[in-house]
Amino acid sequence: MQEPVLLEIRAAIARLLPAGVIASAGAIADAVALLKPAELAPTARMSARRLQEYSAGRGHARKALERLGLRSPAIAVGPDRAPLWPAGFVGSISHAGDLVLAVAAPSSLIRGIGIDLEPALPLDADLVHRVCRPGELAALAPAVASSQRGKLIFSAKESVYKCIAPLTGVFLEFEDVELLFDTGGNRFRARGRGPAAGLIAPATLTGAFAEAGGYWVTAAWQRSRPDPDQD
Ligand SMILES: CC(C)(COP(=O)(O)OP(=O)(O)OC[C@H]1O[C@@H](n2cnc3c(N)ncnc32)[C@H](O)[C@@H]1OP(=O)(O)O)[C@@H](O)C(=O)NCCC(=O)NCCS
């Protein structure tokens, strides 16, 4: 992994996360961590590559939690593959290409958070209309190149899913979520649609996005005490 790419990604993450959220990012190859007993259950069925990204994710999640005061915490796997964060903390993990990114925060500040890292390459044409609403694509013009809009929306919805699914136990489809973009501030808000309308209380789910080092970095979070002035 070229260091400039990582530096760009770390700088972008620092700008987009709310205060109190700690991030740790690195190259997967440099971050393979020793797993804790509580983290071993799913590893028997993993390929070598998958084991590498899984353990690198645990390694960076541990680093983020340690900066919040925990000592060598374990992050087991919960329902639907969601990480099980230590009591009193929330977080999220993403891997893409050779990179891994993890964030963690005290649940006194942040009720839930999701992050996603995606190579900034066009989304497959047949996926664009499954993933994106016409209004979402239109809202990104002209700030985001047309070839990039689908992938950014895909990544932002993955972040929303990782934030909301562990809180609700509900599997969201792409059409269940609508994103309202503010391209001036590189921000978005998310709302549930149809059967998911009641899952996200109005104006409580905020997100941010950045393009850095050839990747889209997105995050979506709910504060424990909603405070629109801080988002
Ligand atoms: C699980 C999923 C979100 C992973 O996203 P991805 O971009 O393929 O892969 P990433 O590397 O960014 O993320 C993988 C990590 O997400 C985390 N994750 C997986 N399932 C999760 C869940 N249900 N809730 C929260 N986090 C989850 C895990 O930490 C996982 O890494 P790990 O297994 O090594 O711990 C995606 O594959 C998926 O299943 N999506 C279905 C839901 C969806 O997209 N709905 C439409 C959006 S609204």
Image: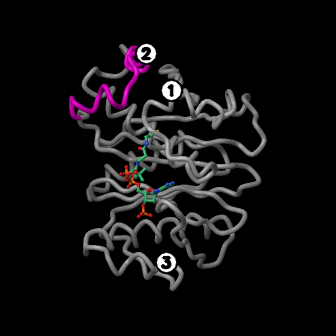
- Kindly indicate the quadrant of the structure image that contains residue 142: top left
Q: Give the crowd class for mark 3: few <14, some 14-19, many >=20 residues within 10 Å.
A: some
Helix, strand or loop for disc 3: helix
Image marks 1 and 2: residues in contact by CB distance under 8 Å: yes
- The disc, 1 or 2, on the residue closer to the chain's N-terminal end is 2
**Residue 115 percent across, percent down from the top left:** 49, 48
**Three-letter code, disc 2:** Gly
- The amino acid type found where label 1 is placed reads Glu
Q: CA–CA distance between discs 1 and 2?
A: 9 Å
Residue ID for mark 2: 135
Q: Where does label 1 land, which residue?
A: 178
Relative vertical location of residue 69 with respect to residue 175 in this rendering, above or below? below
Magenta span contains residue 129:
yes
Camera-nearest residue between 51 and 16: 51
Q: Is mark 1 within 8 Å of ligand 1?
A: no
First of labels 3, 1 by sequence position? 3
| Mark pair 2, 3: CA separation | 41 Å
Sequence-earlier tag: 2 or 3: 3
Residue furthest left in the image: 125
Q: Which residue is mark 3?
A: 39
Q: Is residue 184 magenta?
A: no
Q: Residue at coordinates 57% horizontally, 34% vertically from top-left?
A: 196
